Image: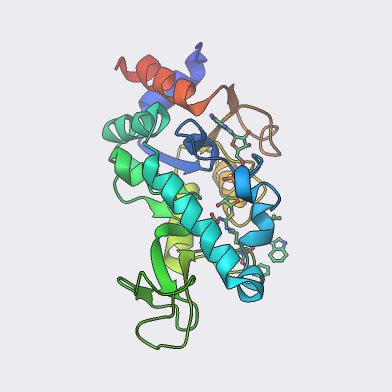
Amino acid sequence: MEIPQPLITALQKAKKVAVLTGAGISAESGIPTFRDAQTGLWAKYRPEDLATPQAFLKDPKLVWDWYAWRRTLCAKSDPNPGHFALVEMAKRIPSFTLITQNVDGLHRRAGSQNVIELHGNIYRIKCFDDEQVVEHWDEHDEAPPKCPRCKIGLLRPDVVWFGEMLPREALLAAEEAARGCEVFFSIGTSSVVEPAASLPYRAANQGAVVVEVNLIRTPLSERADFLLQAPAGQALPALVKAAWGT
Ligand code: BV8
């Protein structure tokens, strides 16, 4: 894959790089993206209709089972060359910040450090009522299990649903990284969900080079300086090889 020389040069010179990833970087690991048709049992549901507190309150078992299915899928999936290329890139950039919208934990499993998980993590479970994370619960309990601590609340995945605030520290750290970087990558995201979708614009507004990696154009494409229109699992290793020969 041909990488534009100006992009290679910008990356080789960069001291501060920030990266935002979305479901697209995990697609080649076999995890359906938000826009992919859900498969099997879940084909008739739209993710946006299930990933909300209202959906959970309306049908707790349905939403709990959807996340249980996704958790199993994530656990069976492995990081792909796109995730590993970001681990390599981080070794060569003095200040590298990885921000993800994904809840699948694949960046950490690939070896990325200090990943900013803007939308939580599907493996972390918390009480719907007091929001406290729960380590263990009665696996034989009906789905969703009751909180073993307060005995009243239902357990839910510790992910950010639509209409819920993002974790404050994570969002502040992501915004700071976008403001201070020289190169900002937006990888495998439809660039429509806020506030994550605003991060590349914050970077562009302070003069950063913005690079989009996606199969198709998105609302960000016209603002990006470079669009690598290819699967992340091919584009990112090609970029690392072009910049650092590995
Ligand atoms: C908030 C975790 C303050 C859960 C997710 C009305 C009412 C309430 C809120 C709003 C409203 N209007 C707007 C909002 C704000 C709302 C929002 O942005 N809505 C959108 C739909 C307009 N945002 C929120 O609600 C956020 N909270 O704002 O709080 C507030 C509160 C109340 C009222 C107003 C404001 C919370 C947003 C977080 C939601 N949680 N995930 C879970 O995982 O179950 S969002 C989920 O979808 C993802 O995490 C991701 O962030 C988002 C988009 O998904 P992507 O990652 O982009 O994936 P997608 O499938 O869309 O695209 C994949 C891309 O990859 C595609 O472009 C594809 O081409 C590409 N691709 C595919 N394969 C590859 C590839 N690219 C490269 N290589 C490949 N191989």
- Vertical relation: 64 (above or below) 89: below
Q: Is residue 99 visible?
A: no
- Give the quadrant of the C terminus: top left
Looking at the image, the residue that sits furthest to the top is 2
Q: Is residue 141 visible?
A: yes
- Vertical relation: 175 (above or below) 15: below
Q: How is the image coloured?
A: rainbow
Horizontal and vertical percent for residue 143? Answer: 49, 70
Horizontal and vertical percent for residue 35? Answer: 66, 42
In the image, what residue occupies the spot 53% across and 43% down? Answer: 22
Number of disc labels: 0
In this view of the protein, which residue sits in the foreground, 184 or 215? 215
In this view of the protein, which residue sits in the foreground, 52 or 140? 140
Position of 182 with respect to 139 (left or right) is: right
In this view of the protein, which residue sits in the foreground, 42 or 238? 42
Position of 26 with respect to 112 (left or right) is: right
Horizontal and vertical percent for residue 212? Answer: 57, 32
In the image, what residue occupies the spot 37% across and 73% down? Answer: 133
Horizontal and vertical percent for residue 186? Answer: 54, 38
Residue 225 in which image quadrant = top right
- Vertical relation: 131 (above or below) 222: below
